[in-house]
Image (tube, rainbow, N blue to C red):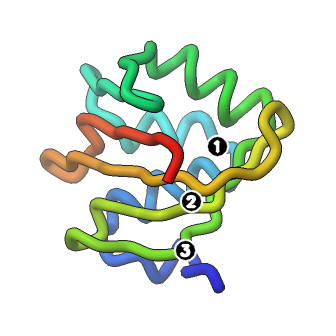
Amino acid sequence: MSIEAERLADPTVRAFVTAVNAHDEAAFRAVLTPDVTMSDDGSDRNVADWADREIFSSNGHMDVESESDGGHTLVVTYRNDTWGEMRTKWGFTVDGGKVSRFETGQA
């Protein structure tokens, strides 16, 4: 059973998930700080390159299974055309209503 994006506790994380699932690059960029950083399985990545590859060019989609830490930590069934479906954990640092860092990896 998944949690609908509009029911997520943190409005910034909610906007992030909504933008990913809508494949809305402008909305995705708008929810990030200009100096946003991220890591995938413990390795820092270039956000723009990673998002293009893992989300936008491969039809990425987040089905949120659970949230904790005030909505800043999610367990997600993530799927895209490259890797198929996998259970992942996402952690978000939110500053001033924008995501300044996100970390994802296998759950």
Badge 3 or badge 2: first in the primary sequence: 2
16 over 102 or under it: above or below? below
Name the spot of residue 61 as percent of width and height, x first. Answer: 70, 53
Of 98 and 53, which appears nearest the observer? 53
73 over 33 or under it: above or below? below
Q: Which amino acid does label 2 sit on?
A: Thr
Q: Quadrant of residue 32?
A: top left
Name the spot of residue 7 as percent of width and height, x first. Answer: 46, 82
Q: Identify the residue position indicated by label 1 in the image.
A: 24
**SS at mark 2 in the image:** helix
Q: Tell me the CA gap for discs 2 and 1.
A: 8 Å
Point 71% across, 33% down: residue: 56
Point 32% across, 61% down: residue: 73
Badge 2 or badge 1: first in the primary sequence: 2
Is residue 25 found left or right of 27 in the rendered image?
Answer: right
Q: Identify the residue position indicated by label 2 in the image.
A: 18
Q: Which amino acid does label 1 sit on?
A: Asp
Q: Tell me the CA gap for discs 3 and 2.
A: 15 Å
Badge 3 or badge 1: first in the primary sequence: 1
Q: Which amino acid does label 3 sit on?
A: Glu
Is residue 73 found left or right of 2 in the rendered image?
Answer: left
Contact check, label 3 and label 1, Cβ < 8 Å: no
